[in-house]
Image: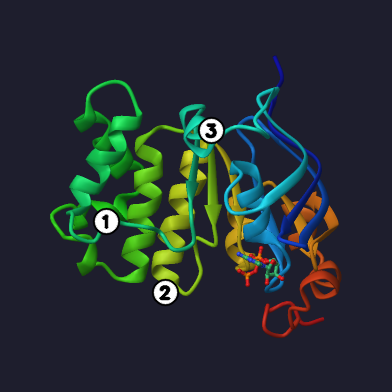
Amino acid sequence: MTDDALVLDDVTLTYGSATAVFGLSLTVGAGESVGILGRNGAGKTTSLRGIIGSAVRRRGSVRYFGEEIGGMRADQIARKGISWVPDDRRIYTTLTVRENLLLASRERSGPARQAVDEAVAAVPLVEKLLPRKGIQLSGGEQQAVAIARAVVARPRLLLLDEPAEGLAPIIVNSLRDSIIELQRSGMTVLIAEQNLNFVLAATQRVCVLDSGRQVLTCSSEEFGNSPELQNEHLAISLENHGRRR
Ligand code: ATP
């Protein structure tokens, strides 16, 4: 048995003949929250796809609680307790939010209603949305529902692809708090995200990609306290980040 939830070992990911991620090695401890940062096109989304084997060709090893999952199908991986929230959210638009959550509860044993109640408690933004149809949701509301839907299955590992992208700060803050609570409750979380403040608040460690290459892995605290590292790896203006020296 291992204390590591996820171990990527020298993982290279390609689309056709184009390599998007080169030799990524990353360990996520059980119960840990880790962020993958990087500029546009750095390979953040591709790295998550590489874990679940979606839409990308993979070389290298992906181990989940000690078991190689590299060759497994997406449905087998989901049954092992990995939930993925894609950046396009994929809510069923003709179903209500409650129905979307109930559908997801089939992935889990036990009473469906209890699973939905727990997910709503974990993502409180969803509560008032339960009777609404998917098509009636804003982007932020869709994101909240997508996270709640992933949580319904009570995953051991939650993969979040750009959860804060394009959302209003009030929604971003609420989703951040939900993710922090989920991690505190024991869930392992891996977030691909460009919003630095979101990642720094919601994770313990960060891995920074640049043009598909891993350029830095350190604690979120160290990265948050270093405008130099942020500027070097993300080219974030120090003024914009409120850390002018
Ligand atoms: P962003 O923050 O803009 O979403 P990202 O860091 O998530 O970027 P990826 O989406 O992983 O980056 O893209 C990494 C590289 O792979 C980019 O050069 C991108 O153009 C390429 N890429 C992504 N998806 C595909 C695809 N389906 N087919 C071919 N190339 C792709």
Query: In percent of the image, x 71 and y 62: which residue is there?
Result: 43
Please tell me how crowded label 3 is: few (under 14), some (14-19), or many (20+) other residues with Cα within 10 Å: some
Is residue 182 or residue 222 the one in the foreground?
182
Furthest residue in direction front, as rendered: 16
Q: Which colour scheme appears in the figure?
A: rainbow
Residue under label 2: 168
Q: Secondary structure at mark 1?
A: loop
* Ligand 1 under 8 Å from disc 3 Cβ: no
Is residue 179 or residue 75 the one in the foreground?
75
Question: Which quadrant of the figure contains the C terminus?
Answer: bottom right
Q: Quadrant of residue 17?
A: bottom right
Query: In percent of the image, x 20 and y 57: which residue is there?
Result: 129
185 relative position to 38: left or right: left
**Amino acid at dot 2:** Ala
**Amino acid at dot 3:** Ile
Q: Pinpoint residue 124: horizontal percent, then vertical percent.
A: 30, 50
Q: Quadrant of residue 140?
A: bottom left
Please tell me how crowded label 1 is: few (under 14), some (14-19), or many (20+) other residues with Cα within 10 Å: some
Q: Residue 77, labelled with which disc? A: 3
In this rendering, is residue 140 above or below 97?
below
Q: Residue 40, labelled with which disc? A: none
Mark 2 vs 3, N-terminal side: 3
In this rendering, is residue 67 above or below 150?
above
Q: Secondary structure at mark 2?
A: loop
Does the residue at mark 1 contact the one at mark 3 (Cβ under 8 Å)?
A: no
Mark 1 vs 3, N-terminal side: 3
Measured Cα–Cα span from mark 2 to mark 3: 32 Å
Query: In percent of the image, x 71 and y 19: which residue is there?
Result: 2
Question: Which quadrant of the figure contains the N terminus?
Answer: top right
Q: Residue 92, labelled with which disc? A: 1
